[in-house]
Amino acid sequence: MVPGARGGGALARAAGPGLLALLLTVCAPLRLQAEELGDGCGHLVTYQDSGTMTSKNYPGTYPNHTVCEKTITVPKGKRLILRLGDLDIESQTCASDYLLFTSSSDQYGPYCGSMTVPRELLLNTSEVTVRFESGSHISGRGFLLTYASSDHPDLITCLERASHYLKTEYSKFCPAGCRDVAGDISGNMVDGYRDTSLLCKAAVHAGIIADELGGQISVLQRKGISRYEGILANGVLSRDGSLSDKRFLFTSNGCSRSLSLDPDGQIRASSSWQSVNESGDQVHWSPGQARLQDQGPSWASGDSSSNHKPREWLEIDLGEKKKITGIRTTGSTQSNFNFYVKSFVMNFKNSNSKWKTYKGIVNNEEKVFQGNSNFRDPVQNNFIPPIVARYVRVVPQTWHQRIALKVELIGCQITQGNDSLVWRKTSQSTSVSTKKEDETITRPVPSGETSPGVNITTVAIPLVLLVVLVFAGMGIFAAFRKKKKKGSPYGSAEAQKTDCWKQIKYPFARHQSAEFTISYDNEKEMTQKLDLITSDMAG
Ligand SMILES: *[C@@H]1O[C@H](CO)[C@@H](O)[C@H](O)[C@H]1NC(C)=O
Ligand SMILES: *[C@@H]1O[C@H](CO)[C@@H](O)[C@H](O)[C@H]1NC(C)=O
Ligand SMILES: *[C@@H]1O[C@H](CO)[C@@H](O)[C@H](O)[C@H]1NC(C)=O
Ligand SMILES: *[C@@H]1O[C@H](CO)[C@@H](O)[C@H](O)[C@H]1NC(C)=O
């Protein structure tokens, strides 16, 4: 059906147990070597459920004589979906320039030249090795590949534009890592994006998904407007755009109201500045002037010294605990004072708790937000997951000339009784998140380690023994069911414990030739839906 697909297991079957022994001895060194073959790899972002990968210099010409070999995985028990956004390899024979996918049971490719390449491969495995090799050549962009687990059959690549779609409403899954892929977007989250914009990059810009995670987007297509205004948001710069026939917007859950407008909101700062204007009068740059919607100079810090020790802050008291999904900032807004904050971190706390720093989801490190690049234009950053707190502080890290800020917080009230919005302290000092997000983000993936017993015990201690017993019983039942589900169809969980074992085992155990399909099997039962992102904010 597809050129180049081969039953990789045939050879293994023929060779028999002798090969097994050989594989056992070479297995570990092989894997090590594979990880070093990265000189031909370009952009690479991987998260547990999806990712993006390109050849070096993409979309420029890939270098001569390079190899890029990476093993990509999704959680065990799920199947990999690979989508080629672009393939442009200068070769007709695939001898020295090619792209090849190898799973434990099958091989797809090699692909090159003007070969018809399937846009999407639905693999039988949760792991595949991508190998790209180049010889001597003149042109060729190489490749752009996105992948996701079979939980996301509506996966698109970073290169899809809204103009590719005809429907007025649709939902798609964006992989992690689209932010830094070359390609334009124009417009903004409020007025919409020109339909020629890249969908996933626009979703990162709009604060719908975090680039490190990817996620589901819901798109509405509307009639175009005469002009699209570009802004910097979430590290992506959108451009101004001219009239188009169509534009698109993202649907949000509505948690995108301006919060700093609240009259009971108080603003304090570590220090403030006073300047003297031309007529000899003092001009105050007090914290109260930090409201973005107010005219006049912004807040500015008293100390304009070097960037070495960031210790100034601007604090906003929202009066009560709120869900904060984003922040908009500007610099001084005064053309004769070229002051602005280039990067900042966010601290937050509630009435009786200590200050915490907002952290990234993936690496659990303090998250540094990209701030302004001039004194005038507003820049937006979104919090995924949202901050749920009463007090927040903007803590500038780097700035131009002097710290000067106007801010606007975006978010909504915490709806009582909506348990997806309950604020919970986590045991580590990770960022605060709603209960729902705690579940989706911290629960790794269906794995034997996720024991429902842990939570249950904590909750049950103060309760009556009977309740403990009932819950424990349910826990065991749930765990049992989970195990059963998880076991199929790729053999026992034990067999998947080590990659090495898996590599050896599969050539023998799984010999039927898998074909890639464009359709998807209905696997709802087998896999657990892990939607990592709840779109909190669309502006
Ligand atoms: C590869 O090498 C050839 C011959 O040396 C050269 O003409 C070509 O420009 C090189 N290609 C790239 C992409 O550097
Ligand atoms: C200086 O500041 C005072 C008081 O804020 C204001 O009335 C005056 O117009 C300012 N002068 C100039 C030249 O901006
Ligand atoms: C709770 O929150 C979710 C998502 O944030 C929302 O869809 C739902 O309507 C809310 N429920 C109530 C009762 O407010
Ligand atoms: C693919 O998976 C199915 C079960 O889902 C299995 O029966 C088949 O042998 C697998 N094919 C290969 C080539 O591993």
Image (cartoon, helix red, strand yellow):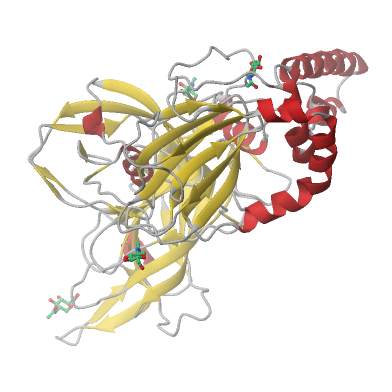
Image x and y of residue 118, in percent: 40, 28
Image x and y of residue 182, in percent: 32, 52
Residue sitting nearer the eye, 480 or 66: 66
Which image quarter is the C terminus in? Answer: top left
Q: Quadrant for residue 481, please give it.
A: top right
Question: Is 87 above or below relative to 477?
Answer: below
Image x and y of residue 159, in percent: 32, 40
Q: Quadrant for residue 8, please give it.
A: top right
Apparent side of residue 133 relative to residue 168 in the rendered image (left or right): right
Residue drawn at point x = 65 percent, y = 32 percent: 75
Residue sitting nearer the eye, 463 or 450: 450
Residue drawn at point x = 43 percent, y = 49 percent: 97
Question: Is 351 above or below relative to 153?
Answer: below
Residue 523 visible? The answer is: yes
Apparent side of residue 396 relative to residue 189 in the rendered image (left or right): right
Ligand 1 occupies quarter: bottom left
Residue furthest out toward the right: 465
Residue drawn at point x = 40 percent, y = 83 percent: 304
- Count of numbered badges drawn on the protein: 0
Residue sitting nearer the eye, 422 or 370: 370
Q: Quadrant for residue 189, please give it.
A: top left
Image x and y of residue 45, in percent: 51, 49
Which image quarter is the N terminus in? Answer: top left
Question: Is 310 above or below relative to 240?
Answer: below
Residue 506 visible? The answer is: no
Residue sitting nearer the eye, 55 or 388: 55
